[in-house]
Image: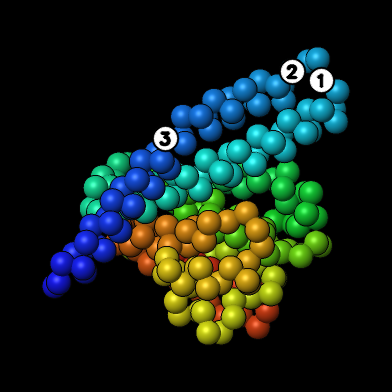
Amino acid sequence: MGETAKTAEQKLALQGDLINMMVHDLKGPLMEVISNLDLIANSEHLDENEKEFAQTAMEGCTGLYDMVQDMLNIGRMESGMMNLEKAPFNLCEVVKAELEKVRRQAEDNRVTVELKCPAELTVNADQKLIARVAANLISNGLKYSPPGALLKISISDGGTAAIVVIKDHGPGVPVEYRESIFEKYVQVELRTHRRQGSTGLGLPFCKMAVEAHGGKVGLNSPERGSEFYFALPKNV
């Protein structure tokens, strides 16, 4: 490898380190904004319209914080520095909790969410990471669901694995991207097919997080919309 190639690689590595540091440093200020907006949204001195404005601002900041967290986690997983904190938990309860967070968004968009899951389905995994996987896929489904549509989420026991399926009735994924949509750099090319408000790292994060547990993420091809799924080993 020539000196020019080495120099280019070194510059790219330094640029990546700088971006990671900047992203990491964003977490603190964002949490301060979210905390203060939460206090404002729950203040007794605001009328309902003002509370709604504060709540909307808080949701936007929370979404930005989640994007930052995804970027940091991807960096950790790519560098092999992500330590999974595994413990048994009820997958159905975690998915329900993530759905509750976006309940207002679904109502505002007039999207009906249908959840089917057993009373209890225990997996041994990193709960925070799997919650983010569920949140990303649910958010993705809501984002592309037209008003009045139905978003179906089903959780089932596949024996050795727990299977989560999120089916929307949006425009679907272009055929040419269905095999590569979970790759990080392909997301840039998909920008024209996505609405604003996304870094394009949600799906690559889901793939890396689930595969770190020995599981699988995929995209089925229904006649209409998209059907994303992930299978998570229950006792790894």
| Residue under label 2 | 43
Secondary structure at badge 3 equals helix
Quadrant of residue 209 within the rendered picture: bottom left
Q: Going 26% across and 63% down the picture, which residue do you hit?
A: 8
Q: Going 81% across and 62% down the picture, which residue do you hit?
A: 148
Q: CA distance from mark 1 to mark 2?
A: 6 Å
Q: Dot 2: within a 10 Å radius of its alpha carbon, few (fewer than 14), some, or many (20 or more) residues? A: few
Residue 105: x %, y % from top left: 72, 48
Look at the numbered discs 1 and 3 and tell me whether their residues touch, using CB distance below 8 Å: no
Which one is in front, 187 or 205?
Answer: 187
Q: Nearer the viewer, mark 2 or mark 3?
A: 3
Which amino acid, by three-letter code, is at mark 3?
Answer: Asp
| Residue under label 1 | 46
Residue 214: x %, y % from top left: 29, 62
17 over 191 or under it: above or below: above
Residue 94: x %, y % from top left: 50, 45
Q: Can the viewer see residue 120 in this picture?
A: no
| Residue under label 3 | 25
